[in-house]
Each structure stands twice: as structure tokens, then as C-alpha cells.
Image (cartoon, helix red, strand yellow):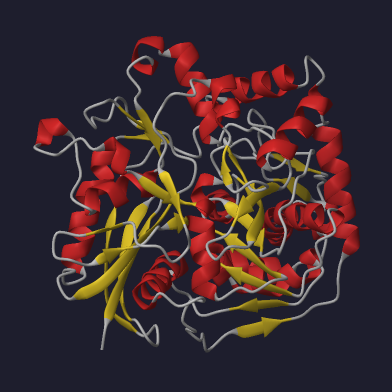
Amino acid sequence: MSLVAGIDSSTQSVKVLICDAASGELVRQGRASHPDGSEIHPDHWWSALQLAIEAAGGLADVAAMSVGGQQHGMVVLDENGEVIRPALLWNDTRSADAAEKLILAAGQGDRAAGAAWWASHCGSVPVASLTITKLAWLGEHEPDLAGRVAAVCLPHDWLNWRLAGHGPRSAGGDGAIDALWTDRSDASGTGYWSPFTNDYDRSLLAMAFRSDVILPKVLAPNQVGGRSSFGALIGPGAGDNAAAALGLGLAIGDVCVSLGTSGVVSAISPTPMADSSGLVAGFADATGAYLPLACTLNASRVVDAATHLLGLDYGQVADLALHAEPGADGLTLVPYFEGERTPNKPHASASLIGMTLANLTPANVARAFVEGMLCCQAAGLDAMTDLGFEPKAVMLIGGGAQSPATRVIAPAILGYPVSVPPEGEYVARGAARQAAWVLTGDDRPPVWPISGSVDFTADPTPIVRQRYNQVNNLTFPLA
């Protein structure tokens, strides 16, 4: 039995799964935590990965490995491979103003024209999460550090590099920044890679920063990037959402709604998408297709907030929500607790609207929080269908999907039946499946079936969505 390892280096932690390469059966696993914050030195990821590998029983017996990582994070290296400053993560919103400047510059002051220009060039409209805006911020606010940048990579690229034995010269490494590699799914979230040409567009990079920096080589989905010290093949890796899609076995037309720290609505499309509204990012997937994606900053933490507000545990909040009527008797939550990315309102805050003495009950509050979280995700799915995407199936995953209330209410809000697979580490599973694909060298990844999914259906409740949209537009009008 050949073994492969899948690594998920996420915002909060790192997970390592060791799987059978042929069947996908889990053999063993380990995890370790990352520090909190939106600005993290990559050394913390490396230290946590060593702990997770040790907890998983080591990697000496694996034939191949691959890394799925949080997208967009800006890792900047000097000519010796030294990390110049802590990485700015996807959820760091300090570059929101830089994103706006890039849009206006492309449109010569006309924001709508600038947004359409960016969407047609890189598939996305700049927002604070994209790497290109973080580089623009760096150039404006930390010019001395910006001047030292010789290479720019993403979190999973940097981990690939370290796993292959490269590293900073100060720590005895070779400093070989020209050995960096990535994959098209993660590259597509930078803002300077085009899903239409399948290549970097350095003219975009020049608009925000400099075009002369080293960028990681973009590998094919099943291409070997390097080898570990013990000879294991290292695959191209993937962005976390693309890795999760691979781990779930999504096919063309499938939609995944992931309720974690962030909320992500992603789909597998045979063609790239460009949305000038900025709601949908035109990313690539980990197989050669495309992954249109709408990401919200607020998802499972919305329900966390409900537990804190009501002083109840998750099960009690779910029970309350299910005992309230759809629409929470007119109580509507716009859940922008941490600002928002989709729609792009980084400085917004949450609002609970429609409160009366009659409807302000614990049950209605619980229901409004669950409905608000799901309405936020439904807006992303609507944006995709507005672009012509036709959903065939909707899958619900993530910590937030474990709530009975979320499962029951989701099909009514989303407007489609939903399937909930068993709880699992699907980003790490997708990375492991990619590693198995690299090992075989076949045209397609191995089939790793998932059993135990549960399906949920419900009558749609369009009035809930209508009220949410009305309140959202009234409270947070578009600029």
C-alpha cells in the first residue's frame, strides 16, 4: 500500500492526513495550532507543521505529499530567501484603500470602468484580500522593506519551498528563491495571474508594485514540484478552496458552500468567469477547470456571536432557531461583524434590524442569526447564476454546517437541496488526493469515494431573502 500525505495550512491551524493512495482511506493524522492574527511570520507555519507531522507519526513512509494553503497571503522574500516582514493574511483589510486606488487608476477615475477592466484581465476586481493589493500597500506604507523584495509567494508556495529543502541563508539554507513553485488555483487569487491566458500578467503587478520580482513557477495539476529530504514527491499544491473541491470530488456544475471562519461559495465551471461587480472572483481550480468563488468574511462566527449574546451553547441556539418561524417575525441580521468582502464593505459592521417588543425573543434572535449567515452566502450563489452558471448540486461543509439548524434552514434560503458530507478535513484530503495523482501521473486524479452524506430539502422562503436584501441595501447602500 502506497501512502500519501495531504497538508492543510489554514488560518487557524495545520492538519496533516496520511491516506492510502489508491482508496483515499485515512491511515493517520495530526494537527497543530497557528497563532491568532491577520499578520503572521511564516516561521510559525513551519514550526506548527513540524508538530503536526510528528503528531501524524511522521512522513518517512509516504511516497508523495501536497500542500493546500490559505489563499492570498503575501509572503515577501529578499535575495537570500529571508522573510522580510510578517505575512499579511487574506483577512487583513488594511489594503482596502490600495484596492480602491487600483480600480480607479485602471478606469481613469471611473470606478465601474476600472472594475470591468480588472475583471477582464485577472478574473477578479481588487479587494483587500488579494495579494496584489497587499503589495500596493507595502510599497506605499513600508517603502524601505518594499525595496528589498526579490520574490513574492503565497503561504503554500513557501511551505512547498521549505519541504523541498530550501530556506533562508541565515538558517543554513540555499536561499534559492528561483526554485519557488505554485499551482494555477492559488496563483489565480493573487490579482496578477489571468485565468484567460493561464499565465502571470506582469503588467498588472507593475501597476501595484514592481514587475521585476521573482514569482513562483506555475505547475500543471499533477506535476512534480520537488522532493523531500527522504525522497517523497511534492506536488504543486493548491489554494484551500480548490483543494477542498478536489477532496470533495466536485465535478462541473457542483457548488460547495463552506461555513468556516470565512464563508465560501465556490463552483466548478468549464470556463473562466469575469464579474465586474466584484461579487464573484474568477479563480482556477486544481484540475484544469475553473473555480468561480464568492467569499464572505462572516460565516460560522455569526453563530458564535449568537451563543455569546444569548449565553447558550450551540445545540441550544440551534434548537431555538428551529422553533422560530421562517423570517424570525421580521427580525433581520446583516452579519457584517468583521466588515465584509462580498459585497466589498471592509469598514461595515453588523446590524440587527426590525426589533420590536414582540419579536425580540431568544428564538427569533437565534433564527435571525442563522438566516443572516445563510443569506450572506446565498448572495454569492445568486451572483454566479446571474453570470450564467447553472448549479447541478449544492454541498454544505465546514464547522458551521454541523449545526442542525443550519442544515435544515440552508435549502430554504439557498433555494436548492443541499447535501452534507461527513465532517472531515477536506482541504487536507484534497491535497492528499493531488499527491496520489502526482504519484500515478494519470490524466485524472484517482477516484476517492465519500460515503455517509445526508441530503436536506425544504420549501424555499424567498420572503426572507427579499427582506434581507432590502435591509442590507438600506443599511449599507452601495457606493
Camera-side residue of 151 and 199: 199
Compared with residue 438, is residue 224 higher up or lower down, i.e. above or below? above
Q: Quadrant of the N terminus?
A: bottom left
Camera-side residue of 147 and 25: 147
- x 77%, y 52%: residue: 379
Q: Is residue 412 left or right of residue 168?
A: right
Camera-side residue of 37 and 203: 203
The number of discs equals 0
**Extreme left residue here?**
172
The percent position of residue 91, horizontal first and vertical second, equals 51, 38
Q: Quadrant of the C terminus?
A: top right
The percent position of residue 420, horizontal first and vertical second, equals 60, 77
The percent position of residue 107, horizontal first and vertical second, equals 78, 21
Compared with residue 35, is residue 450 higher up or lower down, i.e. above or below? below
Query: Hey, which quadrant is residue 103 in on the image?
Result: top right
Query: Hey, which quadrant is residue 249 in on the image?
Result: bottom right
